[in-house]
Image (cartoon, rainbow, N blue to C red):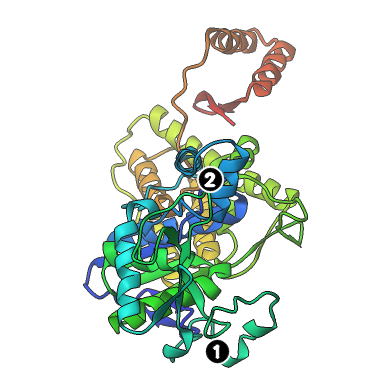
Amino acid sequence: MALQIYNTLNRSKEEFMPQEPGKVKMYVCGPTVYDYIHIGNARPMIFFDVVRTYLEQIGNEVNYVVNFTDVDDKLIRKAEQLSSTVPEVADKFIKAYFEDLEGLGIHKATINPRVTENMDNIIAFIQELEQNGFAYEKGGDVFYRTNKFPDYGKLSHQKLDELQFGIRINVDERKENPEDFVLWKAAKPGEIYWSSPWGDGRPGWHIECSAMARRYLGDTIDIHGGGQDLQFPHHECEVAQSEALTGKPLANYWMHNGYIKINNEKMSKSLGNGILVKDLRKEFKKEAIRYFMLSTHYRNPLNFNAETMDQAMNSVERIANAVGNLKHRLKTVTPDGHGQVRDEMKQKLDSILKQYYEKMDDDFNTPDAITAMFEWVNEANLLLQESVANPEELKAMLAAFDELNAVLRLYAGEEAELLDEEVENLIAERMEARKDKNWSRADEIRDLLAAQGIVLEDTAQGMRWRRK
């Protein structure tokens, strides 16, 4: 089965065929860096990183571009609140973004272009639109002429005459049509600005992504992604700008992830129920956060609550236990001449991997791919129950897991942290207590270590420890 992607543009699954075999151009709208990212931002960050790394797993080279909007109204207001400058605010929150990126087990994009680094490119793009009759200037602002682009609305499946912009309060009377949107904003007193043919100002939001996608990926990209909230107006406006200029499709495949709710309520500032990723990471392991995000299909809504996170924690704990026990068994096993992996074991592992690839090929069905991972956990636990261990089978099991985990990343590996002297002494004391059959002291030490996040496990091959 070839990879199938649900294309928002056509509202159907389509076989994925990049323009150049083996090479994928992918653009995902990144954050406006005026604050720390919240859980709603984290879903596309995690999911589209999964898309990118799965495409790589099946043999593609991916040029993955995620932009930073580092100048807009929100940044200007934040700079005023902090008695700072827009560039300083942007730098602060871009640094925080990369910390959260690492804290969620996400790989860095190929490039993260900033709006402020692309100003000449953006201005030139607007000039071309103006020359071609798709843009007009009024009072230092430049607007896009939507009625000149007949396909406006094709991505969000809305017709221009049904959008009802006119019912909105305070529609700018300078616009030829209420639906027209801004490409360039004239600077207000005291605001950061750039010089342009229309006077000092800064770009509108939509034009930034069109200009950067074209600069870094060309006229037509393979995959354009983002949250469902961006489908209209942001992505719709991108389509209008880019396709009016080039006469070519902006993207061949459009992908949008669903919303996140908090305790079945829409996340909003007015409700004060937003959750910052930096706070979430203090409470939950990154593997649990990833599990929560990937255990529901990306196009479906996702509900965050204490129960779902407890389930996520327990699930990744099951995975970690199985992997850790296999690795421990491999370290302690003595080769006994059984150097071959049984055919039955090969068939089981092949079946699990086949299931994983089939589900991922079906529009990145991560929930069912995770089910394949738990099929592996079951097989690993059965193998661990066998009295005689075959090191080659243990290695084959771990190799299969590495393949399953390479994209989902629900297991991060043993933490290579040294125990401090106090903990080492407690472990040594506990081992002596067990030798002396002083079970109460052994249990007491186990509890002390558990309070410090150290989990001890007594196995048939000896004691092993790990951090929670």
Write down the residue under mark 2.
381
Q: Position of residue 258 (x, y in %)?
A: 59, 67
- The reply to whether discs 2 and 1 touch (Cβ–Cβ < 8 Å) is no
- The image quarter in which residue 128 lies: bottom left
| Alpha carbon separation for disc pair 2 and 1 | 58 Å
Residue placed most toward the observer, 125 or 321: 125
When the figure is inspected, residue 437 is found, relative to residue 202, above or below; the finding is above
In this rendering, position of residue 119 left or right of residue 266:
left
Q: How many other residues sit within 10 Å of disc 1, few (<14), some (14-19) or many (≥20)?
A: some
Of helix, strand and loop, which one carries label 2?
helix
Q: Position of residue 63 (x, y in %)?
A: 29, 59
Of helix, strand and loop, which one carries label 1?
helix
In this rendering, position of residue 345 left or right of residue 367:
left
Residue in view at x 48 percent, y 77 percent: 236
Picture quarter with the N terminus? bottom left
Residue in view at x 27 percent, y 63 percent: 215
For marks 2 and 1, the one nearer the N-term is 1
Q: How many other residues sit within 10 Å of disc 2, few (<14), some (14-19) or many (≥20)?
A: some
Q: Is residue 386 visible?
A: no
**Mark 2 or mark 1, whichever is nearer to me:** 1
Q: Is residue 232 visible?
A: yes
Residue placed most toward the observer, 69 or 317: 69
Write down the residue under mark 1.
160
When the figure is inspected, residue 3 is found, relative to residue 270, above or below; the finding is below
